[in-house]
Image: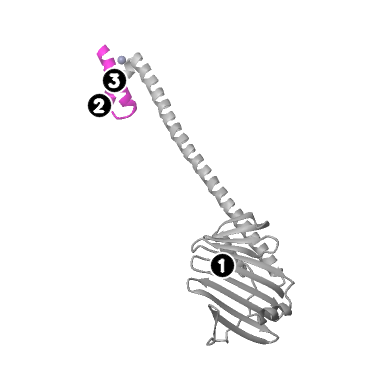
Amino acid sequence: MKIKDCSLVRDLLPNYIDKVTSSETNVFIEEHLKNCEECRKSFENMSEKMEVNYESKENKKINIFRKVNKKIRILKTIIIIIILILIIIFVRNIAIINNIENMASKVNYNNYSKIMIETTEKYISKTEYYQNNDNFIKINTKMNEEGISKVISYRINGQEDMRIFDNGVENQDINKTSIEKDVQYQFLNKSFFGNIGIALSFGSVKNITLYNKPCYLLNVDNYLNFIDKETGLTIKEININNNSVIDYKYTFGDITDEKIEDLINNL
Ligand SMILES: [Zn+2]
């Protein structure tokens, strides 16, 4: 056995173990290993090492797989938590809206007044509405660059009329057939499914205090509603899109027929 053969075989062993040597080389190496104890030992050593190496590579692959799996699990958990939070917000919004609706529907609208003041960039408008049973008067006063206009409609003891004044001068040619009793005001006059839509589109429902009253502030598409928690009635509306503000004031149980008659007689 020549020393030179040994060193050649040892150089070839890694490739032989990896099975990339030619069949002629294989015969040469196997012949040599049969007869050379030293080279056989180093062959055994090397094949063990390569196996360990191979195994550790497999382990690494498994570890990477486990890490990716863990990340996916964390991501899934985060998504589930976000969905749960959205569901909680949605259910809370539905509960608040239904509560507001319930309260607003319990208000007795038979004897009340409502005053709305709307301020926009183009005009200021004040609408007063007084009602007792079938009798009512609605006075709308609007101020803009052209002056002041007033539209008054009323019904007293079955008699209805409507009068319009432009800068203090009564307009005689008006269509008086469209006198309508004002609709009872409720914040949300929607179906349950309508409320779901509102709840879904809510940016937020906040608890705040306005004019010393605890309120809900509902923000829907830049449209802010301040709702009195005690009555469920809107007391302020702000439309950020067109810069308009509407303030509402209500009284209940103090509107008499005499008061309505007085207002009509003083037109
Ligand atoms: Zn040898």
Residue 139: % across, % down: 61, 76
Which residue occupies the extreme front position in the image? 168
Q: How far apart are the alpha carbons under marks 2 and 1?
A: 101 Å
Q: Is mark 1 within 8 Å of ligand 1?
A: no
Q: Which residues fall within the magenta stretch? A: 3-28
Q: Is residue 63 on the magenta stretch?
A: no
Q: Is residue 112 visible?
A: yes
Q: Nearer the viewer, residue 63 or 250?
A: 250
Residue 261: % across, % down: 70, 81
Question: Who's the residue at 60% across and 79% down the image?
Answer: 152
Q: Nearer the viewer, residue 210 or 161?
A: 161
- Asked if residue 165 lies left or right of residue 32, the reply is right
Q: How far apart are the alpha carbons under marks 1 and 3?
A: 95 Å
Q: Is residue 9 on the magenta stretch?
A: yes
Q: Is residue 2 visible?
A: no
Q: Residues within 10 Å of mark 3 (few under 14, many from 20)?
A: few
Residue 191: % across, % down: 61, 69
Instruction: Point out the tag, 1 or 3, that comes first from the N-terminus.
Output: 3
Residue 101: % across, % down: 66, 66
Q: Mark 2 or mark 3, which is nearer to you?
A: 3
User: Looking at numbered disc 1 in the image, what kind of residue is underneath it?
Assistant: Glu
Q: Nearer the viewer, residue 35 or 93?
A: 93
User: Which residue position is annotated with label 3?
Assistant: 11
**In the image, residue 68 above or below residue 45:** below
**In the image, residue 222 above or below residue 4:** below
User: Which residue position is annotated with label 2?
Assistant: 24
User: Looking at numbered disc 2 in the image, what kind of residue is underneath it?
Assistant: Glu
